[in-house]
Amino acid sequence: MNSLEKSQIRNKAPLILIVDDVVENVEILYAILKDHGFRFALAQNSEETYRAIEREVPDLILLDVMMPDEDGFQTAAKIRDQYPHSNISIIFITARARTEDKLRGFQAGGVDYITKPFEEEEVLARVKTHIELQQMRRKQEDLIAQLRGALDEVKQLRGIIPICARCKKIRDDRGFWRQVEQYISEHSEAEFSHDLCPHCMEEMYSDLINGSEK
């Protein structure tokens, strides 16, 4: 996926993938979240989950622990292995709130738990919190990419630059000869103000200077 495609996806509303084979659970979660600016994808088992992620990587997955083919912990671990740099937030949905289950979920790559039966305020608060954290991480990634791009531009001015020994023009990457200030302006954010150094002033206006000294 190129940078344009990534930018287009990031400009869309956050995508939440709901993974649960119980229709009633899906309907409840959708009813709680539908009016808060999210997009939704649905899956009933792990295979459908993987296919949904292939179509578009979600910002957050609401993942039921008990599924017909494999449990949510196994699915989460596979997602982390297959998409190590995606930073998908995974919230487990479970009726069990035992400490050992929660520890297993965090070890599998989950970031939070929502317990059944659902409490509307709790679901909304947890989802919004992790969506906001995800968006902050994305902005940080974009900023890092911009900084790397700026460093790459700075590095273009390093190394050997072909320059004419007489007129001091610089040959660019396409073979064109350009004035020094034009070349630097195109490869950096530097701006120029023109003046004359004392040596050039002496050469160009020696008569005027010497005349004024008499």
Image: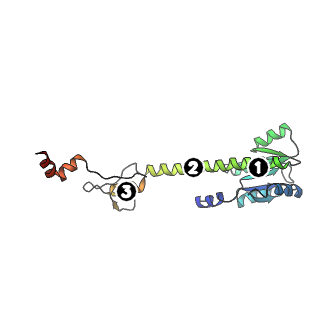
Q: Which mark is residue 37?
A: none
Question: Which callout, 2 or 1, points at the residue further toward the start of the chain?
Answer: 1
Q: Residue 81 at what x, y percent from top left?
A: 71, 48
Q: Element at badge 3?
A: helix
Image quarter where the C terminus lies is: top left
Q: What residue is shown with label 2?
A: 143
Mark 2–mark 3 distance (CA, rounded to whole Å): 26 Å
Quick one: 42 or 85, which is closer to the camera? 42
Q: Residue 185 at what x, y percent from top left?
A: 39, 55
Task: Residue type at mark 1: give it.
Answer: Val
Judged left or right of residue 83, residue 194 is: left
Image quarter where the N terminus lies is: bottom right
Task: Residue type at mark 2: give it.
Answer: Leu
Q: Element at badge 2?
A: helix
Q: What residue is shown with label 1?
A: 127
Q: Is residue 87 visible?
A: no
Outermost residue on the top side: it is: 99
Q: What residue is shown with label 3?
A: 183
3 or 1: mark nearer the eye: 1
Task: Report the residue at 80% width, 59% height from top.
Answer: 42
Task: Report the residue at 76% width, 41% height from top.
Answer: 107
Mark 3–mark 1 distance (CA, rounded to whole Å): 50 Å
Task: Residue type at mark 3: give it.
Answer: Tyr
Mark 2–mark 1 distance (CA, rounded to whole Å): 24 Å
Question: Which callout, 2 or 3, points at the residue further toward the start of the chain?
Answer: 2
Q: Element at badge 1?
A: helix
Quick one: 200 or 42, which is closer to the camera? 200
Pointer 2 with pointer 3, Cβ within 8 A: no
Question: Which callout, 3 or 1, points at the residue further toward the start of the chain?
Answer: 1
